[in-house]
Amino acid sequence: MELPKAYNWKDYEDDIYQAWEDTGYFNPDNLPETHVEPYSIILPPPNATGTLHLGHAMYVIQDIMIRHARMQGKKALWIPGTDHAAIATQSKVESIIMKEEGKTRHDLGREELNNRIDTFVEGSKTTIRNQLRKMGFSLDWSREQFTLDSKLMESVQTMFQKMAEDGLVYKGDRIVNWDPKLQTTVANDEMEYEEKKAPFYYFQYGPFEIGTSRPETKFGDKYVVMHPDDKRYTEYKHGQTFEAEWISGKITATVIKDKSVDPEFGSGVMTITPWHDVLDFEIAERHNLDKEQIIDLEGKLLPIAGEFAGMPIEEARPKLVEKLKEKGLLTRVDEEYEHNVNVNYRGGGVIEPQIMKQWFVAVDKQVMDWNGKKMSLKEVALDVVKSGDITIVPDRFNKTYFSWMENLHDWCISRQLWYGHRIPAWYKKDDIEGVNPVVQVDSPGDEYYQDEDVLDTWFSSGMWTFSTLNWIEDFDFETGKPKPGTDLEKYHPTQVLETGYDILFFWVARMILMTTYGMKQIPFETVYLHGLVRDRDGAKMSKSKGNGIDPLEMSVKYGTDAVRLSLVIGTSPGNDQRLFEEKIAGYRNFINKICNIARFVMMQLDEVPDTMKGTNGNPLPIESKDLALADHWITSRLHTVVEEVNTHMQEYRFSAAAELAYEFMWHEFADWYIEINKFQPNPALSKAVLETSLKLLHPFVPFITEQLWKSLGHEDSLMVAKWPEISETRNDQLEKDFAELQDIITQVRDLRGQYKISYQQEFNLYTSSAISTDDAKVIKNMCKVKVVEGEMDGNTTDVVNSRYKFQVHLGDLINTDEEKQRLQKEIDQLQKYVTGLEKKLGNEQYTSNAPAEVVERDKKNLIEKQESIVTLQESLNKLG
RNA sequence: GGGCGCUUAGCUCAGUUGGCUAGAGCAUCUCGUUUACACCGAGGAGGCCGAGGGUUCGAGUCCCCCAGCGCCCACCA
């Protein structure tokens, strides 16, 4: 097949992807029978909120692992899917509706809103599917999943029911993070802090001075709390009461002593508002104090606030301060106070803690059977990582995982949204408070109504590795094991979870909790955490900043393969990377290089009889005795590279693996071997080396390698070609011999350049000892010099074992001053090195403690360099 | 307050269990278009591996300490 000089990915990529899909190999059921051992990865589902960004392009790591496993003859399964992302999706659609129609969700009603969201989500899913295809991901589309599909819906609700039966899910009064804007609770880790400057007020409260940045919560305060050891307040005893003039007249307040108060902060005394502050809530729980609601769910003050009732807090605050000031209770104000405001990171409002009835997962209740012990969810989650059943790459995240898991509190899983998995709890219609639920998937009857809330989206995502493998049907709840012969049995636990480190807590930790409970298995053997993709200045990419790089735009401009390589090379797990266009362009050049290498090889093949072309899939013809040094060398190098790439792949060092294959292909195969092939052709070997290189590169750059594979006449896809295995035939001596030859060539070229000898001129080259005719030919052609054979000692020697001494007689061409300087500099450098080596070798501790081969190498090195110095010194002397 | 990471060539970054005279890409400079490729080839210059201590025959790599940058968690009445 004829290939163009420059590779035009646009002409190939879509067709190649279509051809892959046509083979059916993305589905492991269709793989040849030789593929036996299961290997599975579940794609972390992108949110169905629109389009994919560059972060999602990091899925390429998973494609590399899957393609690698598939070529290794495993039954490789990679399941795609999308997440309904309840709060993110609902608020996105709500804001669209508000913008376009000026309506709220309450105007539409629950059913209509969900219909609108479904339509939106369908559109997103189509876009996402196309984007994933465009990136060349070998996903099994026949097993595609969506977190709200009916089977998954049933799985989630069944899980809820099971957990409720085991007492792991309960309903309770808890202080929760309430978002008055989106009208929902927010998980702790869904909040972010915004630093704000706000006045900090000090008020007289009975005999105490108290400080607050939130005076509007103080209406119901009737406790003052201080540290038990605070010497300033020893005269006040725990439980003692006192009278105080406050907002609406005299009140009776109680002294509480609690260690959670920091005596250094403010006056060391504070009043508490248990209903609207997490810490205050805990103090109130400890001492059994009354709790009173001050602010409603809309963020407005309740009747307890008297004349301020009904006001939003921002409005009430200054007015209340004014009133207290008039009463003479305001003692001072700190205008420069900086504090953090909690904000819903999903684009919601300022969080107002509230006490509400919510559903929780109990993480400390010991009801799980694990390794013959009763353990809690938390204990199991800690155990599986501590015991090494789950490995986190890079391992420094173990520490982060442990500290997070150890501090985990019961997890609030109910959300006041309309979109998502509705909680399968049912109340009698007269049970308005919702205190006696029946928990089951289906409605117990007409006299019941269902809980209004939906589940936190991490509850369903936490089940992702097994819910996507048809857990609801294929898990035998009687035996606690997957049914034999099912996907669930074959592919679970999955091999790897590959995701960004930013959701280690959000997601990875919850998957471990949910899976050890639901499957009695770990969800995955290895967690590979990649870094975040940033712009060239290290800033996070975001739409609002406009510094984002659209992966698809880059794919069109430089080809998908180039984008994929740029995301892999030069990166390491857990560390952020900076990506910019020039980097992608650099890899585009490499893709073009591969294409041209193949073109050269094919042109060469066309010029030789078919019998010399080698046959498809044959092992390298390394055994042949007729090979020239270059042939031996490239073969040996290839084996070395294969071995090292394999090690890198095994150790999850994808950057190193890709870089090595890249280096070999370009700077060894193309720059040296192919150059030599121009006058010493070996098309069969060229082809074999090319094919093995294509295999090594395929997981990284699947499109170009597949295209060339087909061009080389292969029927079946490169996807299922046999991955190159480690070979015994590498030969270090050969590699060294060739390195010497390279060195000679470099020297000669250098001299030729130095004395301005043009290609047309000839200059004679004498070697001081025998050199094989093959090598002489290589030198002659690579350097464009004439090799005078008459000066050799007659016969060619065995190329493999010959040693060279090399000397160039340049006669009149030499510019003595320059040459003297050059030689002297070189001698000085070498002398320095030799002195260092001698000192090293003179040290007995070194010679006896260092590995023998290292010492040996140093000794050999020393002799060589000493010889070089002598030679150089001779040359210098000759110049006078 | 607790924890983690980064600091290596002008820029972006690799560097595995300590062991060849510390690497790559881009940028730069010199030379070169002989039909695989100018999205190219040959070569050069450019580094007290953040500072300071320590362990070791030997440290970019391990330990301690410091500095700058970044991130996570907790707290902020």
Image (tube, coloured by chain):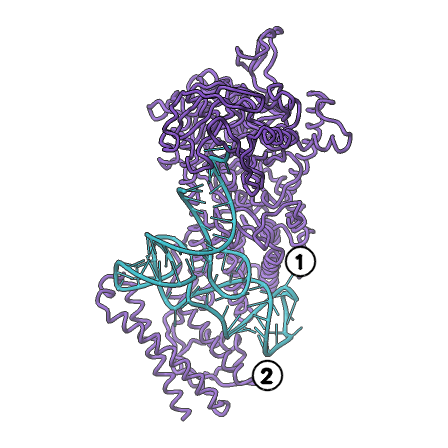
The Cα atoms of the two marked residues, 2 and 1, are separated by: 34 Å
Q: Name chain B's colour.
A: cyan
Q: Quadrant of the C terminus of chain A?
A: bottom left
Q: Looking at the picture, how far across and down is residue A710, in whole percent?
A: 61, 51
The secondary element bearing badge 1 is classed as loop
Pick the residue in front: A410 or A50.
A410
Q: Is residue B8 left or right of residue A142?
A: left
Q: Is residue A376 left or right of residue A754?
A: left
- Residue drawn 51% across the image and 78% down it: A749
Q: Quadrant of the N terminus of chain A?
A: bottom right
Q: Going from the N terminus, do you reach mark 2 or mark 1 first?
A: 1
Density class for disc 2 (Cα within 10 Å; few <14, some 14-19, many ≥20) is: few
- Residue A698's tag is none
Pick the residue in front: A47 or A20.
A47
Q: Which chain is purple?
A: A
Disc 1 is attached to a residue of which chain? A
Q: From where the camera sits, is residue A30 visible?
A: no
The secondary element bearing badge 2 is classed as loop
Q: Looking at the picture, how far across and down is residue A21, in whole percent?
A: 62, 39
Disc 2 is attached to a residue of which chain? A
Q: Looking at the picture, how far across and down is residue A776, in whole percent?
A: 47, 77
Q: Which residue is mark 2?
A: A760
Q: Is residue A28 above or below residue A7?
A: above
Density class for disc 1 (Cα within 10 Å; few <14, some 14-19, many ≥20) is: few
Q: Is residue A784 left or right of residue A554?
A: left
State which mark lies toward you, 2 or 1.
Answer: 2
Pick the residue in front: A849 or A337.
A337
Q: Which residue is mark 1?
A: A2
Q: Is residue A240 left or right of residue A561?
A: left
